[in-house]
Image (cartoon, grey):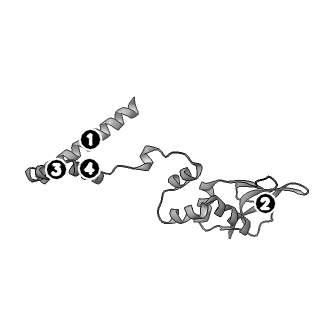
Amino acid sequence: MVRIRLSRTGLKKQPSYRVVVAHNEAKRDGKFIELIGHYNPRTEPLTYKIQEDRALYWLSVGAQASDAVRRLLEKQGTYDRLTRFHNGESLAVLVAEYEGKPLPVAEVAPVTPLEVVEEVALEVTETDVEELTEAEVEEVAEAEVEEETDESSAANEG
């Protein structure tokens, strides 16, 4: 079994720890799979930093956190985000939330053709709907989708 646990570093009576992913049979300070963070209990307030994306990855594939690491991850909010990740939320969105970075526009709201059709339908008033046929509404929606793709390709080229 794979565990996320602490590996001790530092001088005698001055501990600091690495947060590592290791096999449960490996020695405490021995071989590990990946280093994903650090923890220093000697500072006031204590300091720790765990890579959110790697922790979410290892937890999602079945790694078990030790009790100490579990408390750190709960303080950091990783277990809440893990639940949201299992419910289908994007890993990029969750990591950006943790890091406090604004999301790229493409990841915030990808536009699907269905959304464009709905927007076009909202722009058309009820009296216009009676005059337009379904084919004409679809043509307007397709024209708007083509305009958006033309604008995005022009922006990428320029």
Q: Which residue is mark 1?
A: 146
**Residue 50 in the image: x percent, y percent?**
67, 55
Whole-Å distance between the Cαs marked 4 and 3?
12 Å
Q: Is residue 144 left or right of residue 18?
A: left
Locate the C terminus by quadrant.
Answer: top left
Q: Is residue 117 left or right of residue 155?
A: left
Q: Amino acid at mark 4?
A: Glu
- Mark 4 sits on what residue? 119
Closer to the chain start, of discs 2 and 4, is 2
- Label 3: which residue? 125
The local crowd at label 2, few if under 14, some if 14 to 19, many if 20 or more residues have their Cα within 10 Å, is many
Q: Earlier in the sequence, mark 3 or mark 1?
A: 3
- Indicate the amino acid at tag 2: Ser
- Observer-side mark, 4 or 1, equals 4
Which is closer to the viewer, label 2 or label 3? 3
Q: Position of residue 51 (x, y in %)?
A: 64, 53
Q: Residue at x 61, y 55 (%)?
A: 52
- Dot placed on the residue nearer the N-terminal end, 4 or 1: 4
**Observer-nearest of 53 and 101:** 101
Q: Which mark is residue 7?
A: 2
